[in-house]
Image (spheres, rainbow, N blue to C red):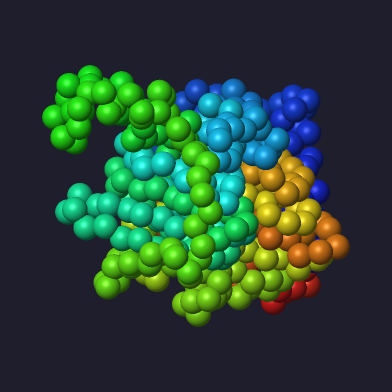
């Protein structure tokens, strides 16, 4: 299987070079118009090309699927910063956008909501607290540690605040590539642009009292440190809580050859209806073998190590890209791919999908399920002993 994987990666790289240079394996594989007959009067044609010709006009160029999120310019305010990767900076990323946010001790990401996307988060380091309000008027307060997740459905109001005396930072993923963290509906922005007489009527304040409010959007606001012991924690006493303990919940564990995978789907975490997500760790020299996603786009944020992704895009298209910490990858639904650890330490990747149900198919599962005669026909010229090894791998 290792040899097969190397062959795939090599052929993917070759496919990328073919697309880039415009080289052609064949001139064409077409007959004359009308050859083969019509309707029930269809007939055999003389044998044609042994392999198909892919016209670049039919399939288009293979898109770039790597972007340096942490190499992007941060938005910096008094309490921290945020960097984003949306479809505007990363054109292939149509289904999912991502953000890396850093909050100083005591800082808060003010009350806000998103009109076009749900929010999924993975806490990298530090501690924080979220307050979320749903349309029923119910609210939930949760405290988070490294390895915890949160999920806020589209439109639900929420805020984030660091607790404890060290910074907190986390990865955010949104189920709409056009979503921008820098264009959310924020409470200070709203109050700043609303007429004072309306605000006075809303809050029972004098118009003069409103002069003390921020002039513009505070976004991430500095503030006094909140000791962990003083931080409220009021989770919902029901299954649809906004919090999931990814690194501590045994339901999340999914082992695979070459590493480990912790994943939360709607099955383990019912409120997370539009997204799935987790963390994959691949050991040095190992890989997440060839597979494709049936029902969702896939997004990566590289936390640690060095990796290589080989992407197959149909129509003779393949591309290989190298990844390091701070990079993101985007795999469109249905595109075949494999991920290899090319470094000497564990490769850690935060991964999300824009569907609550996680569904994928491994190439080797297909090969094992297929009759030997089908594989021999597909791989014409491949020796029988090689076919046997494919089915046993």
* As drawn, 7 above or below 16: below
350 to the left or right of 233: right
**Residue at the image point whose x is 52% and y is 41% from the top:** 222
In the foreground, 160 or 201: 201
Asked if residue 47 shows in the view, the reply is: no
- The image quadrant of residue 243 is bottom left
**Residue at the image point whose x is 33% and y is 24% from the top:** 211
196 to the left or right of 317: left
In the foreground, 113 or 386: 113
In the foreground, 311 or 183: 183
Residue 14 on image: x %, y %: 79, 40
Q: Quadrant of the N terminus?
A: bottom right
Residue 196 on image: x %, y %: 22, 21
Labels in figure, total? 0
Residue 126 on image: x %, y %: 59, 59
* As drawn, 267 above or below 326: below
- The image quadrant of residue 56 is top right
Residue 120 on image: x %, y %: 45, 52
Q: Quadrant of the C terminus?
A: bottom right
Asked if residue 285 shows in the view, the reply is: yes
In the foreground, 309 or 317: 309
13 to the left or right of 359: right
Q: Residue furthest right?
A: 344
145 to the left or right of 266: right
**Residue at the image point whose x is 36% and y is 42% from the top:** 111
Q: Residue furthest bottom?
A: 250
**Residue at the image point whose x is 29% and y is 43% from the top:** 155
């Amino acid at each position: 299987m290792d040899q097969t994987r190397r062959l795939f990666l090599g052929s993917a790289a070759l496919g990328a070079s073919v697309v880039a240079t415009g080289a052609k394996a064949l001139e064409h594989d077409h007959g004359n118009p009308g050859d083969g007959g019509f309707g029930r009067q269809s007939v055999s044609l003389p044998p044609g090309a042994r392999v198909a010709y892919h016209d670049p006009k039919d399939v288009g160029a293979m898109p770039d699927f790597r972007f340096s999120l942490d190499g992007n310019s941060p938005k910096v305010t008094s309490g921290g910063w945020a960097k984003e990767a949306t479809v505007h900076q990363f054109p292939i990323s149509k289904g999912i956008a991502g953000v890396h946010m850093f909050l100083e001790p005591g800082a808060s990401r003010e009350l806000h909501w998103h009109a076009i996307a749900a929010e999924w988060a993975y806490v990298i380091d530090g501690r924080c607290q979220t307050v979320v309000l749903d349309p029923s008027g119910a609210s939930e307060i949760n405290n988070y540690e490294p390895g915890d997740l949160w999920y806020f459905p589209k439109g639900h109001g929420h805020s984030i605040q660091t607790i404890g005396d060290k910074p907190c930072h986390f990865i955010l993923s949104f189920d709409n590539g056009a979503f921008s963290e820098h264009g959310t509906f924020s409470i200070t922005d709203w109050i700043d642009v609303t007429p004072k007489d309306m605000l006075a009527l809303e809050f029972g304040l004098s118009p003069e009292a409103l002069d003390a409010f921020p002039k513009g959007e505070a976004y991430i606001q500095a503030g006094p440190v909140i000791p962990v012991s003083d931080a409220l924690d009021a989770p919902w006493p029901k299954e649809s809580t906004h919090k999931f303990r990814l690194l501590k919940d045994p339901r999340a564990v999914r082992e695979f050859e070459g590493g480990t995978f912790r994943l939360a789907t709607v099955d383990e975490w019912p409120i997370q209806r539009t997204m799935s997500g987790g963390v994959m760790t691949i050991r040095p020299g190992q890989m997440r073998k060839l597979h494709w996603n049936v029902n969702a786009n896939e997004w990566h944020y590289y936390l640690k190590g060095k990796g290589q992704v080989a992407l197959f895009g149909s129509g003779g298209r393949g591309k290989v890209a190298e990844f390091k910490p701070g990079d993101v990858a985007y795999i469109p639904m249905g595109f075949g791919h494999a991920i290899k650890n090319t470094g000497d330490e564990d490769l850690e990747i935060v991964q999300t999908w824009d569907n609550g149900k996680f569904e994928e198919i491994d190439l080797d599962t297909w090969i094992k399920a297929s009759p030997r005669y089908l594989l021999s026909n597909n791989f014409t010229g491949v020796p029988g002993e090689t076919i046997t090894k494919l089915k046993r791998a």
